[in-house]
Amino acid sequence: MEYKSIASEVIKKNKEELKELSREIWNNPELNFKEYKSSSAIMNYLEKKGFTVTRGYCGLETAFKAEYGDKERGGPNVCVICEYDALPGIGHACGHNLIAEAGVGAGLGVQGAIDAGLKGRVTVMGTPAEEGGGGKVLMIERGGFTGVDLAMMVHPAPYTSIHNEYLCITRLLVTFKGKAAHAAAFPWEGVNALDGAVAAYTAVSLTRQQFKPTWRVHGIFAEGGVKPNIIPERAVLDYYIRAPTRSELAVVKDKMIACFKGAAAGTGCEVSIEKKDQDYENVLTNKVLADLFTDNILALGVTDIRPSGPAGSTDMGNVTHVVPGIHPKYAIGGGEVNHSPGFTAVANSDSSHDTTLIMSEGMAHTCIDILTNSELLVRAKEEFERDKDLK
């Protein structure tokens, strides 16, 4: 039996178990670095299926590495990635339960091909805290992707597209410090930190007129005072800054910092700027892998593939800067958009599970292409080296 057919049969055979795993994750939404139930459920399942699982991988409690295949036999080590953290208040509104299901399913498919004689190894990598924690960034820094030849994952969305423009991102916490005073009796004794924050927010909004279409800046007032009759002595802005490349991100960041400092000077406040979280890189979509994946899902009956689509940011971008990788999106229907309560509901529908397992097959087949044709991996790595020079 041909290896791809074997992989598909294994995934279909385990369909109900994979669906149940996904639903267990969906029913227990956990925030970044707190995905104890979700990660444990995945690790237990993979151990039951014969994978060697390293728990607490890279010193992160909810990270794991699950490996299968005989290293002594040689062959590449292909990696499929699981995410499983949720969003505050709206649960799995980005469908990470489905991402985990897809990654585990793909791992089982490649495992079946290896058992049938295919030379190589498969790693299912469990990566916590994509939603504002940078689990993959920390894992990279600690050598977590050493020994991996390529990495891939898929992400549910309202549409299917392979080459997506995921942006670099940095997060800044901007704190304005003023002086409190009675707002009616002695306002001249105060320095209004909220005025500084409002001036900064306004300056950022005005600066957008000179932004390139691919630049994104969005922020909120995280703090703005405690009572109307007290001049606020502290106000805080929380900003995300995004751009297609690291060099462009630096340009936008400098513009924002100028807005913050100018607003502070104009209102008599002090300002401090703190970088929060891990910076995410843009995704370097490897064309060799992307073309293979596209051909495989077309062969599985997927239609209506967009050439590209709008995207946010992901720490999978950082992974694609250390190994060849892809991060396709796939449609789960319903017309709902990510990070909405409607998407949370759709992420647990039967049709979404069915579509997710097709994507599992697509990833497994792409891994099998690499494991059966050494030239493809050579080409993927050559393109990866060229892409790194453009970042």
Image (cartoon, rainbow, N blue to C red):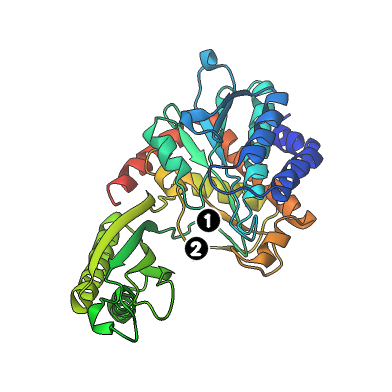
Residue 121: quarter of image? top right
Of residues 388 and 46, the one drawn nearer to the viewer in this rendering: 46
Q: Give the camera-side residue of 102 and 228.
A: 228
Q: Are marks 1 and 2 in contact (CB under 8 Å)?
A: yes
Is residue 109 visible to us here? no
Expressed as whole percent of the image width and height from the top left, the position of residue 220 reads 43, 70
Q: Residues within 10 Å of mark 1 (few under 14, many from 20)?
A: many
Question: Would you identify the image quadrant in which residue 352 lies?
Answer: bottom right
| Mark 1 to mark 2 CA distance (whole Å) | 6 Å
> Looking at this view, is 107 or 267 the one in front?
267
- Relative to residue 150, is residue 276 drawn left or right? left
Quadrant where the N terminus is found in the figure: top right
Counting other residues with Cα less than 10 Å from the Cα at mark 2, is it few (<14), some (14-19), or many (20 or more)? some
Q: Nearer the viewer, residue 361 or 312?
A: 312
Q: Secondary structure at mark 1?
A: loop
Of mark 1 and mark 2, the one earlier in the sequence is 1
Q: Amino acid at mark 1?
A: Ile
> Which residue is drawn at the image coordinates 31% and 79% (left, top)?
195
Residue 273 x/y as whole percent: 28, 60
- Please name the residue shown 60% across and 52% down the image: 86
Q: Which residue is mark 2?
A: 308
Q: Is residue 62 visible?
A: yes
Which residue is tagged 1? 162
Q: Is residue 139 above or below residue 167?
A: above
Q: Which mark is residue 170?
A: none
Give, as a three-letter code, the residue at label 2: Ser
Residue 164 drawn at (x, y percent): 48, 59
Kind of element beneath mark 2: loop
Number of numbered discs visible in the structure rendering:
2
* Residue 77 to residue 154: above or below: above
